[in-house]
Image (cartoon, rainbow, N blue to C red):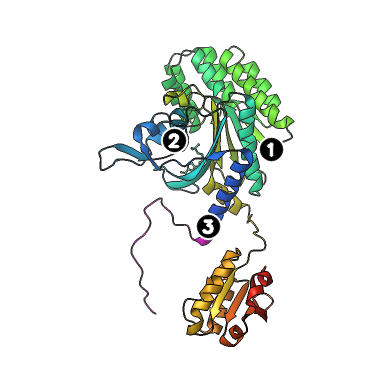
Amino acid sequence: MVQTKMSKFRTVRGMRDFLPKHAGKMRYVERVSRELALLYGYKEVITPVVESYKLLAAKSGEEIRQRMYAFKDLGGRKVALRPEFTASTARLVATRMKNEPKPMRLFCLGSLYRYDEPQYGRFREFWQANYELLGSEKPEADAEILILTNDLIERLGLRNYLFKIGHMGILRGILSQEGIVEESQNRIMQLLDKKQEEEALRVAKDRNVSERCIKTLKTVLETRGKEPSRVLRRVKEEVQEYEGAVAAVENLSDILELAKDSGVKFKMLIEAGFARGLEYYTGLIFEPYVPQLEIALSGGGRYDKLIELFGGEPTPAVGVAQGIDRLVLAMRKQRFSPRIRGEKRVVVIPINDELKAKAIELSLTLRKAKIPAEVEVMGRTVTRALEDADRKKATHTILVGPDELREDKVVLRDMKKREQKLVEIKNLCKEIM
Ligand code: AMP
């Protein structure tokens, strides 16, 4: 057996290379996300991968804080690789975009870093498309973010998905009225996010909440269902003595009603005790799922206090982070692959060494007409070059030969039909398209 040389270098644990097929799918989801941003009026901003540790740690939640790629740069600054986009957006809105008219619709897309334990659908480097709607506290803003997320998932061809929906105000309303400080509330939310309900209730008990509170919390945590109006009516009855929680239920009803009345249909699972790990959420929270994956495709919600926390004007805001890696996984699970129609791929093959420059020249002409073209650069025989063009599924090849060139012509070969003809160079692009 022939021993081939193999480098010992590998990617760092949790980091991935994307080979062309996978990279193509990631870029496809990115493209659709960008199109959507344009269609909904979200303007793109590009923020740095490296941010100050303090900014990122301020409000992201213990879970993420402990998993940040944090380090001192050579200037001794404590910095970290961004684990999410919202802090950076909030920083922008609190500083350089402070005076922009509201509402502001911002979009950002890129890679994020969390030192998570690598497992299926969980990586240390992953990608998100992020949409933030800033300046409105109205339910129509929340509805827009939900509808936009539904739109993206639909455009990606996913089926049978379901939105898990809740409202941070329900649990926080109860806990606040019981005098639980925000820090303890956050602890409880984190435990609930990790499905540790017993533990969460114990923390509440340790803070001396009333018997009534524990009873209400228990029922709220169990209340879920697919029919929004019915579930929310039930929750409202359960929390009726907690003013803030009642307001939260009403707010959620308004949001879901708007989505429904606008004719948008998606399956929902309303969970009154749904909590998300990020500390800054104040209102609606949601996560879409497909049955084939147990992990959320995206995560969104309202965060009305964050901009203020970073020194900006009080600015209500709602947003969503679409997980590009997981959307690709879901597409693969559901065996959906986008058909990109009418794509041409041309290989230009010079018949001898003297015609190399002419082959390059022709490839440039094709590209000017937006026809993807590759030039044979291995010095192979025509037969070999044609075999290779077949392997890479070229739609056409162009054979550049001296006799034909003398008449300003080349041989154009249709690789699928396996036919070839002499074509005048000036008509080449037209013939291919
Ligand atoms: P979060 O910022 O935690 O609300 O997450 C929003 C979305 O980002 C999730 O629903 C995932 O799609 C994606 N996401 C978060 N963490 C990871 C990770 N470690 N690997 C891959 N995707 C992730």
**Residue drawn at (53%, 71%), measured in percent from left and top?**
374
Residue bearing the label numbered 2 = 88
Displayed quadrant of residue 256: top right
Residue bearing the label numbered 1 = 266
Residue 272 location (% of width, % of height):
59, 26
Residue 214 sits above or below residue 141 on the image? above
The answer as to whether callout 1 falls within 8 Å of ligand 1 is no
At mark 2, the secondary structure is helix
Residue 95 sits above or below residue 292 on the image? above
Image mark for residue 345: none
Residue bearing the label numbered 3 = 22
Residue 29 location (% of width, % of height):
57, 50
As drawn, is 241 to the left or to the right of 228? left
Q: Nearer the viewer, mark 1 or mark 2?
A: 2
Displayed quadrant of residue 135: top right
As drawn, is 184 to the left or to the right of 256? left
Main SS category, magenta section? loop
The kind of residue tagged 1 is: Phe
Q: Read off the magenta span.
A: 1-22
Mark 2 and mark 1 in contact (Cβ < 8 Å)? no
Residue 274 visible, this angle: yes
Q: Is residue 10 magenta?
A: yes
**Residue drawn at (65%, 78%), measured in percent from left and top?**
424
The kind of residue tagged 3 is: His
Mark 2 and mark 3 in contact (Cβ < 8 Å)? no
Residue 368 location (% of width, % of height):
58, 65
